[in-house]
């Protein structure tokens, strides 16, 4: 019975990490409903595979990598079902901005602004800029080369800066 | 560290912001920023993007996490960790049986057992074995009562407790007499839980002591205990009843439970601490 308490640890850690995992999932899915479904699946998988977690490094890195892998699978399935799907940021020649991204946004609309960024950019930005993962850790989590991490990060920063600058200019 | 000399300037300056450039390159880039206005302007834009993004993503953390998600996680059963161990034992047992001496012993037991069975069967001997009914777990029933009480009392502001925390000595003597269980008031202040007083409840027709604490999120966490006929010790068992989470255990002839919101991630940790202090 004492094992219950030990097992609770990963569940407890997962509950504590939920806001961050959910935020990371949002950068992949870019909508709350898909993000919640993804997080639920990730957490169930993390608990059932908790014996595989070796306790080294950051738990969130393991969870994030699992989140990203599950999302890649899901996107693949959707492509098969619909014949189309999300294009990875690394495969795009130019950045896609949806209608929401075209509109100027104010400080309280920053979330929407972030959601208008391609998946690959916001995920890299969150991992490096917001959560302080190294380029190597980020590359491992997202399964991309370090060079891609670097170029996406720079693009994300310039894009975020331009969004607000553009907004300020429009308001002036 | 990465050698970035072949990368575009914006990528190199971005890496400078993250401290992911080699020492000599760092000096070179800093000199460039100091002397070249275009480089400085680009660096400022990157920095601004960094700051804006940080603010935006911090906002995400303020969004409430769906309670259903938290419950789902807590209800997900982990794998049986001892499966591989039992497999190991089984294979060891099987290999031991394959030893010649063991096989001979099994054969002898089979002959002797078969003979006894034949004689007993011939005499129509039917052993009168009493059927032992498993006793229904009392714990689950009293937990229903505790969860129901918690839903009501946790919402109380002015009348949360029957006896205030200032009368700690009285609480201990009163509840010890009423419930028949000696205890000490656990100090959970290092975990951010402030003692708010006590109540006497009734669950399954028995008196139950309830010690009430408030955490930093303003949620009520309670410790309840009652005298229980069984004197079995067991480990922690987590149960979720809709919005209420309960971590229960037995020690000696006493049943304990820590109860709080099911979204509270630290109930088991609190229960572990209480079990050592109370």
Image (cartoon, coloured by chain):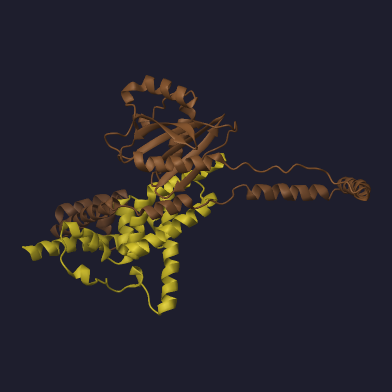
Q: In the displayed structure, does residue B123 sit left or right of residue A122? A: right
Vertical order, B188 against A167 (above or below): above
Q: In the displayed structure, does residue A109 sit left or right of residue B164? A: left
Residue A64 figure quarter: bottom left
Q: Furthest residue to the left?
A: A172
Residue B168 figure quarter: top left
Q: Nearer the viewer, residue B180 or A168?
A: B180
Residue B69 figure quarter: bottom left
Q: Furthest residue to the front?
A: B205
Vertical order, B28 against B174 (above or below): below
Q: Nearer the viewer, residue A161 or B246?
A: B246
Count of numbered circles in the view: 0
How far across and how far down the image is residue B235, in percent? 55, 37
Vertical order, B169 against A56 (above or below): above
Q: Nearer the viewer, residue A91 or B211?
A: B211
Q: Quadrant of the C terminus of chain A?
A: bottom left
Q: In the displayed structure, does residue B88 sit left or right of residue B216? A: right
How far across and how far down the image is residue B142, in percent? 49, 40
The residue located at (31%, 56%) in the rendering is: A126
How far across and how far down the image is residue B9, in percent? 24, 61
Vertical order, B116 against A95 (above or below): above
How far across and how far down the image is residue B111, in percent? 93, 49
Tell me the yellow chain.
Answer: A
Residue B168 visible from this viewpoint: yes
Residue A145 visible from this viewpoint: no
Q: Furthest residue to the bottom?
A: A83
Q: Nearer the viewer, residue A115 or B271?
A: B271
Q: In the displayed structure, does residue B32 sit left or right of residue A3? A: left
Tell me the brown chain.
Answer: B
Q: Quadrant of the N terminus of chain A?
A: top right
């Amino acid at each position: 019975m004492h094992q219950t308490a030990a097992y609770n640890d990963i569940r407890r850690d997962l509950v504590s990490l939920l806001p961050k995992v959910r935020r990371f999932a949002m950068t992949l899915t870019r909508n709350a409903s898909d993000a919640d479904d993804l997080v639920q699946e990730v957490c169930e998988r993390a608990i059932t595979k908790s014996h595989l977690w070796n306790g080294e490094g950051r738990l969130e890195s393991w969870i994030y990598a699992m989140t990203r892998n599950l999302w890649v699978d899901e996107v693949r399935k959707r492509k098969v079902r619909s014949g189309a799907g999300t294009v990875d940021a690394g495969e795009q020649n130019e950045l896609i901005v949806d209608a929401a991204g075209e509109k100027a946004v104010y400080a309280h609309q920053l979330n929407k602004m972030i959601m208008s960024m391609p998946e690959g950019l916001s995920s890299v930005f969150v991992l490096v800029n917001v959560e302080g993962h190294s380029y190597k850790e980020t590359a491992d989590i997202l399964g991309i080369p370090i060079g891609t991490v670097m170029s996406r990060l720079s693009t994300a920063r310039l894009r975020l800066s331009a969004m607000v600058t553009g907004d300020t200019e429009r308001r002036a | 560290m990465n050698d970035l000399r072949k990368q575009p300037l914006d990528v190199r300056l971005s890496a400078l912001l993250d401290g992911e450039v080699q020492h000599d390159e760092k000096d070179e880039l800093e000199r460039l920023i100091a002397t070249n206005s275009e480089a400085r302007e680009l660096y400022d834009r990157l920095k601004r993007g960094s700051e804006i993004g940080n603010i935006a993503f911090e906002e995400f953390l303020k969004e409430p996490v769906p309670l259903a998600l938290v419950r789902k996680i807590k209800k997900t059963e982990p794998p049986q960790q001892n499966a591989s161990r039992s497999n190991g034992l089984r294979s060891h047992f099987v290999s031991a049986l394959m030893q010649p001496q063991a096989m001979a012993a099994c054969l002898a037991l089979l002959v002797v057992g078969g003979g006894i069975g034949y004689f007993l069967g011939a005499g129509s001997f039917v052993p009168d074995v009493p059927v032992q009914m498993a006793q229904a777990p009392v714990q689950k029933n009293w937990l229903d009562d505790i969860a129901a009480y918690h839903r009501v009392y946790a919402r109380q502001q002015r009348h949360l407790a029957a006896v205030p925390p200032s009368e700690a000595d009285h609480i201990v003597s009163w509840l010890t007499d009423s419930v028949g269980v000696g205890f000490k008031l656990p100090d959970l202040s290092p975990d951010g839980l402030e003692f708010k007083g006590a109540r006497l409840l009734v669950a399954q027709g028995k008196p139950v002591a309830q010690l009430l604490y408030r955490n930093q999120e303003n949620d009520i966490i309670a410790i309840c205990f009652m005298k229980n006929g069984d004197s079995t010790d067991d480990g922690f068992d987590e149960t979720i009843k809709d919005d209420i989470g309960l971590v229960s255990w037995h020690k000696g002839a006493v049943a304990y439970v820590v109860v709080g919101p099911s979204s509270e991630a630290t109930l088991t940790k609190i229960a572990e601490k209480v079990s050592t202090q109370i």
